[in-house]
């Protein structure tokens, strides 16, 4: 086998180890876990919109434990300040100078819990970090650790005391999806697993940082034909031409859809991207970036249904 083939097989094995490790804690969510790993390895971030108790926090902790990553959790509240996330300069009396005290954002995996409960000013503190893996504080630029991955959560059924995420913030998330409820049998299995001890307390790291870097490198090497690149752009441009959409998806959506499709293709064992992978990811990658006009919203139209219509109408290359 060539070196390229060997590294591809190794990357597939790493993905399998990660998913198997996460599946010890998160039951009945196999494809959702693969979406999460696709965003993670493609360098994106994930927004989980789900009701309480479905395992969002547990999933973030399990991912950090699985790859020996530094994990931080920030509970977003209305009184949270940007400095509570980024850090603050403190005057050192011994040195007679200010020193920068890093905030929780300086980690590998950040859980931004209930992100829509913080004010827009505090939400915006994440913009530069999520786009460029750096923060600018008092004319100084601080690089964040690599990898840097944000898992943000929000509750879709509570609106009092919340601030909707602005379009610029939503555009920073590679994917938005829900874990959802599991089946009756899977919920019974969760009860049995939690009977004596939480499975996450027994979770051990299954990959190291060199393996994680190999994953990220191999994702970039997954082939995607020019025809499928045109297909991705056709899907994204269709959001801008749709009369029900007042704000279509940006070129960042096209780039993210391509990267996540490459990652998911690798997870599925393909050395190339296929149209069905692009179609599968179009909704979680693109839908949350759309701005729907008020008339369409009152008519019951949502971003997901618009994307499904676009996928059904855009011609698939042959």
Image (cartoon, rainbow, N blue to C red):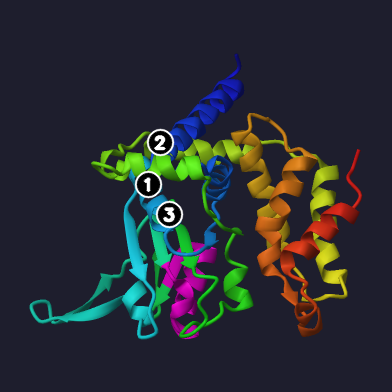
Q: Earlier in the sequence, mark 1 or mark 3?
A: 3
Q: Is residue 250 visible?
A: no
Sequence-first tag of 2 and 1: 2
Magenta-highlighted residues: 113-135
Query: Mark 3 sits on what residue?
Result: 55
Q: Distance between the residues labelled 2 and 3?
A: 15 Å
Q: How crowded is mark 3: few (under 14 residues within 10 Å), some or many (20 or more)?
A: some
Q: Mark 1 points at which residue?
A: 62
- For the C terminus, the quadrant is top right
In this rendering, does residue 292 appear at all?
yes
285 drawn magenta: no
Left or right: where 314 falls relative to 133 = right
CA distance for labels 2 and 1: 8 Å
Residue at the (90%, 55%) spot, across then down: 313
Residue position for label 2? 21
Q: Which of marks 2 and 3 is nearer the N terminus?
A: 2
Residue displayed at 77% across by 63% down = 305
Q: Nearer the viewer, residue 76 or 104?
A: 76
Judging from the image, what secondary structure is the residue with disc 2 in? Answer: helix
139 lies left or right of 233:
left
Contact, CB < 8 Å: mark 2 with mark 1? yes
Examine the residues drawn in magenta and state their main secondary structure. helix
40 with respect to 101 (left or right): right
The quarter of the picture where residue 140 lies is bottom left
Q: In this view, does 146 lie above or below 210?
A: below
Q: Which residue is farthest top?
A: 1
**Residue at the far left in the pictured view:** 94
> Separation of disc 1 and disc 3 at Cα?
10 Å
């Amino acid at each position: 086998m060539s070196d390229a083939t060997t590294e591809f097989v190794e990357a597939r094995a790493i993905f399998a180890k990660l998913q198997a490790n996460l599946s010890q804690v998160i039951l009945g969510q196999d494809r959702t876990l693969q979406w999460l790993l696709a965003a993670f390895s493609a360098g994106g971030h994930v927004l989980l919109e789900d009701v309480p108790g479905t395992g969002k926090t547990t999933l973030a902790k399990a991912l950090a434990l699985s790859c020996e990553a530094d994990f931080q959790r920030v509970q977003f509240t209305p009184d949270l300040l940007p400095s509570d996330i980024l850090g603050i300069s403190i005057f050192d009396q011994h040195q007679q100078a200010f020193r920068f005290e890093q905030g929780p954002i300086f980690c590998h995996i950040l859980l931004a819990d209930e992100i829509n409960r913080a004010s827009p000013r505090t939400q915006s503190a994440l913009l530069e970090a999520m786009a460029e893996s750096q923060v600018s504080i008092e004319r100084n630029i601080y690089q964040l650790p690599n990898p840097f991955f944000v898992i943000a959560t929000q509750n879709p059924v509570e609106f009092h005391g919340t601030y909707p995420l602005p379009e610029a913030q939503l555009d920073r998330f590679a994917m938005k999806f829900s874990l959802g409820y599991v089946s009756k049998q899977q919920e019974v299995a969760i009860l049995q697993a939690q009977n004596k001890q939480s499975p996450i307390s027994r979770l051990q790291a299954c990959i190291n940082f060199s393996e994680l870097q190999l994953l990220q490198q191999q994702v970039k090497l997954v082939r995607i034909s020019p025809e499928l690149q045109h297909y991705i752009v056709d899907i994204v441009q269709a959001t801008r031409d749709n009369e029900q959409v007042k704000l279509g998806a940006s070129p960042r959506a096209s780039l993210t859809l391509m990267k996540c499709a490459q990652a998911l293709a690798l997870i599925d064992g393909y050395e190339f991207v296929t149209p069905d992978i692009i179609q599968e990811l179009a909704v979680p990658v693109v839908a949350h970036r759309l701005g729907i006009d008020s008339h369409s919203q009152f008519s019951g139209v949502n971003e997901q249904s618009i994307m499904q219509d676009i996928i059904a109408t855009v011609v698939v290359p042959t």
